[in-house]
Every structure is written in structure tokens, then in C-alpha cells.
Amino acid sequence: MENWISKNNKAWNLLFRKFKILERVNNNEFYEITADDIKTSGREPRLMTKFDSSENLPDIFKENKLSILPIKRGSYIIGRFQNYQQVNVNKNIEVETKQLPDYITTIDYQNITSEAISLNAAYISGMLEDIVGEPVVPTISGRMGTGEFNYKILLNDQHTFDINVENSQMEIDGSYESVSKFIILEAKNHYMKDFIIRQLYYPYKVWKSKTNKEVVPIMLIKHDNIFNFLIYTFENENNYNSICLKEIRRYILGEPYNPIEISDIINIMSNITFVEEMNDIPFPQANTFNIVLDLLSELNAQDMSSDDITNFLEYNPRQTNYYIDAAKYLGFVTKDKNYTLTDYGRKIMRMNHKDRTLEIIKSILSHRPFYLAMKQQLENYAFNTDAIARSIDECRSEINKISTAKRRTSTVTAWIKWILDVTTYFDIIDL
């Protein structure tokens, strides 16, 4: 069965041919398309225009470095806009512990998969009050009109482009008001490489003219029970790309935060028992390990079909299978009627944050190619990809070409970098 991503790709390919969109963007810097135009593809505009991350864009947009923005109700503009903001969370920032009050029985801090519940937990536990520095109360949320305003946005060639917005729609996940500040919060319950600036800019632009309080746009990315608050400002309220990261605040809910030390990794390696590679499960081709963690969290809440996982990850079915296979490779996921956590997977999801992370690292390093790559990094601060490829080739009979093994080293090195990313600083050592 086709998922929405595949359907969007086909529909946008049709629209690009029908309206000569690429040719018109090349000639005029933009193309305005209406909701009625989009409907001629057989797809609803709301399903065809919401791309929270650049990774979600249709292939034809990615290939031609295009993006899309709403400009009025029922109308959108396509161009080579710099539409997304990179997400870089400094893992060296202290993680503070917050607790829910004892009388709260309806929120399980170990199993929060809803963005709305993440926002409620952040408010109830005092995270937001801590960030603002004074008491806050929730106010507006949901869909609303933008009214009329103008702004400038950068094109990929660094020229600015003027956009006029006339009563478009915007949506606010949550907002919170204190005596002196108005907080606009966009929440994501999974890892993101980047996010579309519009989700913060349009509400910021609208409410900047409606309140005399300081308007503070915040992106909340909750991942692996860590609440990462990225606090932004717009240095020029009329410039979409003037977004500037002011501060990052990090919290964990319901448990102390214990950092992973490099000594913990060395202890795992000193006591490792290697597993035999099972050729019925492909060697991993899933470079972003944080997505594996998001998949485990979602499956901890409910079993899922392949289509469910594809829609959750917002990937195409082929990419989805890579991440499912990666979780299976580590022994965390199996398939009955739907995909479900194994007993081992459920066991680790009941652990506290540090123990769970260390158990996941142990599962990775119990595979020889990953252990070898980790040893290289600890000893030399460098990877020998030829040696890693030989290790893959030796332990995987289905990989019968060294060139294929070399391609697989990208996942090995990416996972080791993830391990190092969640640990404290280390010096070169002898093992």
C-alpha cells in the first residue's frame, strides 16, 4: 500500500508537469499555486503542503532546492527559499530534573508519545516557569488566521524576496503568558535535523503587533525523555531568516539525569560478549540512530504496522524498512501481526535513562564491526574504514563484495559517533 509520502511525490510530479512549475520558478523566482490547482492532483492541499522538516519535502522539491509557504487562505508560493532552521543541541548543557506532582496519575513520564502531553508535562512540572523566570499560564492554541503582513526571506542565492501574507492560516501548539512575556511553543516528539521557521515566525509576527509583552518563540524537541527547549529570537521582525538561537534549556522528567562517562563505555567493552551475525536480518543501513530511539519509544506505547511506522517516521517505505531492520538487528523489535518490541526491548524501555542508554550501547558493541570502530575511535580519534569494511565482509555472508561492505561502514561510523555524542569528553587512551 502506498503511503502519503509516495502519493505526495506522484501528485507533485503531476502538478510540476501540468503547470510547468520549475520553468516558471526559474524565470520568475517563484510560482503561486492555489488549493484548487493542488486538488487537480487528486490530493487534498493540507496533505500536500505540510513539511515540518526539509527531510519531508517531496523528491522534486529536494532535487531542485525548492520549498513552499502559505501566503493566503487557499494559496501558496513555491520558490528557492531558505525555509528551514538547523537543529543543533549542545549535549554538554546541563540536564535538570523536574518532577510531576504526586497527585498526577494520568501522565506516565516514561511513555509520552503525544506532543500535547509533552507540553502539558512541561507546564505542570514547572519547566516553562523555570525558563521564563516567572509564573506562566496557558493561553491560546490551535488554528487561527494571520491577518496581513509582509516580510523578507532569503533565496538560496542569498538575495532577499518579499512575501505578502493575506489572512493565511497558522497553528500554535501552545502558548504561555507571564507578567512580562508571551511564549509561543512549537513541540516535536521526535528527533529532527531541522524545522520550518514558519511555525515560529508566523505566530511571532502576528502576536508581536498584538501584545506589548516580549514575544519569545521556543521549539521543544522531546527525544528519549529529554525535553530540549531551543529559545529563539528574531533579530529583525520583518526578516524571516533573522531567527537567532539565544539559549538551550534541557530537562529530564521523573528521574535523575546521570551522564554517560567514557569509563562506562570502556567497562562495556571490557566485558563484551559478541553475538553471531544473523544473515536473515540485513546489516544496518540506518545512519541516524536517534530515529531508532524514536521508533522504540513509539512501539513502547503501541504495536504498529509497516504503514503506521512509515507515517510516523515520515519516510518512504524503503527508508522505513531500514530503520525497522536496524531495530530488529539489535534485538529490540520483532514482527507478529504488527511490529512489536521483543521482551528484551520492553525490558530496556522500563530502565532509567542511563541504564537504558548503556544497554543499547552494549547491544551495538556486541557486533564485531561496531566494536572495532569504537576501539579505533578511542585509541586514535579516527576510523579506519577499510578495516571496518573487512570486518563486515568477514562476518556477513550475504555481503559478498568489499565495495558493498564499504558502503555499510557509514552506518557503523554514524552509530559510534552517536555513542560518543552521548558521553562526556574523553582523551586518547590505551585499551
Image (spheres, helix red, strand yellow):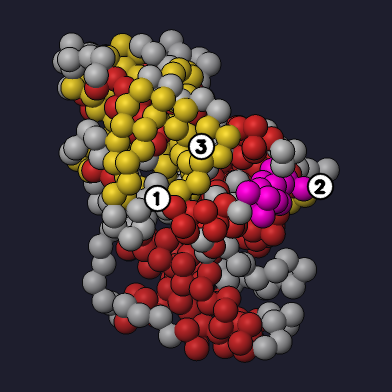
Is 237 colored magenta in this rendering? Answer: no
The amino acid type of the residue labelled 3 equals Tyr
Q: Residues within 10 Å of mark 3 (few under 14, many from 20)?
A: many
Mark 3 near mark 1, Cβ–Cβ under 8 Å?
A: no
Residue 108, percent from left and from top: 51, 25
Q: Which residue is mark 2?
A: 1
Question: Vertically, is 36 above or below 262?
Answer: above
User: Residue drawn at (43%, 73%), measured in percent from left and top?
Assistant: 374
The amino acid type of the residue labelled 2 equals Met
Is 12 colored magenta in this rendering? Answer: yes
- Residue 277 visible, this angle: yes
Q: Which residue is mark 3?
A: 76
Residues in magenta? 1-19
In this rendering, which labeled residue sits more in front, label 1 or label 2? Answer: 1
- For marks 3 and 1, the one nearer the N-term is 3
**Cα–Cα gap, marks 1 and 2:** 33 Å
Mark 1 near mark 2, Cβ–Cβ under 8 Å?
A: no
Apparent side of residue 207 relative to residue 273 in the rendered image (left or right): left
Task: Provide the secondary structure element on which disc 3 rests.
Answer: strand
Residue 38 sits in quarter: top right
The amino acid type of the residue labelled 1 equals Phe
Q: Which residue is mark 1?
A: 81
User: Residue drawn at (61%, 87%), measured in percent from left and top?
Assistant: 403
- For marks 2 and 3, the one nearer the N-term is 2
Task: Provide the secondary structure element on which disc 1 rests.
Answer: loop
- For marks 1 and 2, the one nearer the N-term is 2
Apparent side of residue 39 relative to residue 173 in the rendered image (left or right): right
